[in-house]
Image (tube, rainbow, N blue to C red):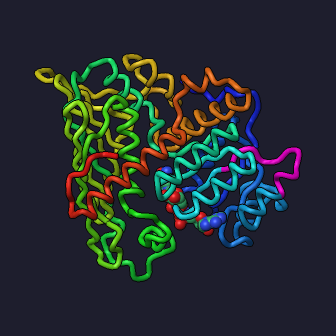
Amino acid sequence: MINGERSIERPLRWGMVGGGRTGQVGYKHRTGAQRDGTYRLICGAFDLDAERGRDFGTKIGVVADRCYGDYKELIAVEAGREDGVEVVSIATPNFTHYEITKACLEAGLHVICEKPLFFTVTECDEIAKLAAENGLIVGVTYGFTGHPLVHQMAAMVRKGMLGEIRIVDMQYSHGFNSGDDGGAGEAVKWRTNPKTAGPTFVLGDIGTHLYYLSEVVLPHLKIEKLLCDRKAFIPTRAPLEDHATVLMHYDNGARGRLWVSSVNAGNMGSQRYRFVGSKASIEWSDAHPDQLTYEVQGEPNRILHHGMPYLEEESLATDRMGALHTEGLGDSWANIYLWIAQAIDAKRRGDEAFLRSHHYPGIEAGTEGVRWLENCVRSADAGAAWVAFE
Ligand code: NAD
């Protein structure tokens, strides 16, 4: 159980790019980072609008002269301070991730970046090389993958409690983009433009969450081929999609089905996962994150609750609230930030042995998400054809 005691030598000096007053995801970063005394927010370039960013920054406790006009100024000024920033979170639209990450790494700063990480696997590989050469960590924030019941699912699969995995069924959908984009806000405008969103809309925006969570639960399964069918129900969003279905064949013979949509009118179910094995199935949804359904063929179905002593050790080790008390998205983000802090701390100490055995969403997690997107787009653009996973 995690109780907020600091698990690293001292708090990391932390800054943010984006995530200001108008950003949707910034608060989740701060909620995650500031739980366990592992990060101290000392600076930021919080907003495209420098004045609004400065006003916002001071209102969340950052001194005015460390609220910068843009990320370049942040890097340059902080580099000249003895107590300068060490790690920067990037919570800006997709098209800025690569250039800001690169600039931070070149300045010797660790990075925690939003998904989808970059536009291409080539960019991911280049950044992975740069981070390795400079001895720096790149973390990626897939929000719900720190939840204790996600790690319960991984442990149950690893122990063989499901038998051989046969079916992977995942859905992340909502209806917020069911209407057209007349009068849409900035967050929708950049998401539906390939120049700012990258090669996908909902596949990258929400599908990468599904894909990474399935990698956490089923690390032994590799995709052999996939078929992606995507469509823009609102034509102005084309060539990007507001709806997609992906079929996947895995190397153990398992079959996968994933659908993502932002035009699932009225739906508030968000993420749902069902993993089916030869003996039993498990099902989890972030609509009811405290419960995991465990169904053994021929036995009464069971509901497992987070924090209960019958769960696996690796699930209990990630629990914060204890059974009976709601454990949610903020707690999951706190775990992700904690694991990345521990990786940064180990890197600073040169503890490569710790890093080899430490699980956190790093550059590989970001890269694999982008690789999956590249394969989806190749299939969709070939007319929803089966393509070998490359
Ligand atoms: P948003 O449009 O709501 O907010 C973006 C913010 O970034 C704005 O406040 C804007 O002023 C600021 N900004 C833009 N460019 C900037 C720059 N160069 N320097 C400083 N600030 C800049 O976007 P959002 O929904 O918060 O998404 C941001 C990123 O987070 C995207 O990559 C998105 O995919 C990701 N995201 C992740 C999750 C998650 O659960 N991990 C959830 C939502 C969004």
Badge count = 0
The answer to whether residue 1 is magenta is no
Toward the bottom, the furthest residue is 182
Q: Quadrant of the N terminus?
A: top right
The span picked out in magenta is 77-88
Give the residue drawn at x 37%, y 54%: 373
Identify whether 358 is placed above or below 28.
above
Give x and y (percent) for residue 271: 34, 48
Identify whether 34 is placed above or below 243.
above
Residue 304 picture quarter: top left
Identify whether 33 is placed above or below 267.
above
Give x and y (percent) for residue 274: 25, 38
Give the residue drawn at x 72%, y 46%: 109
Q: Is residue 375 left or right of residue 100?
A: left
Is residue 205 visible in the rendered image? The answer is yes
Residue 293 picture quarter: top left
Residue 99 picture quarter: bottom right
Identify whether 170 is placed above or below 119.
above
Quadrant location, ligand no. 1 = bottom right
Give x and y (percent) for residue 27: 59, 53
Work out whether residue 242 or residue 335 is closer to the camera in this orientation and state it: 242
Work out whether residue 100 or residue 388 is closer to the camera in this orientation and state it: 388
Work out whether residue 335 or residue 137 is closer to the camera in this orientation and state it: 137
Q: Is residue 363 left or right of residue 341?
A: left
Give the residue drawn at x 30%, y 56%: 260
Is residue 22 visible in the rendered image? The answer is no
Toward the left, the furthest residue is 298
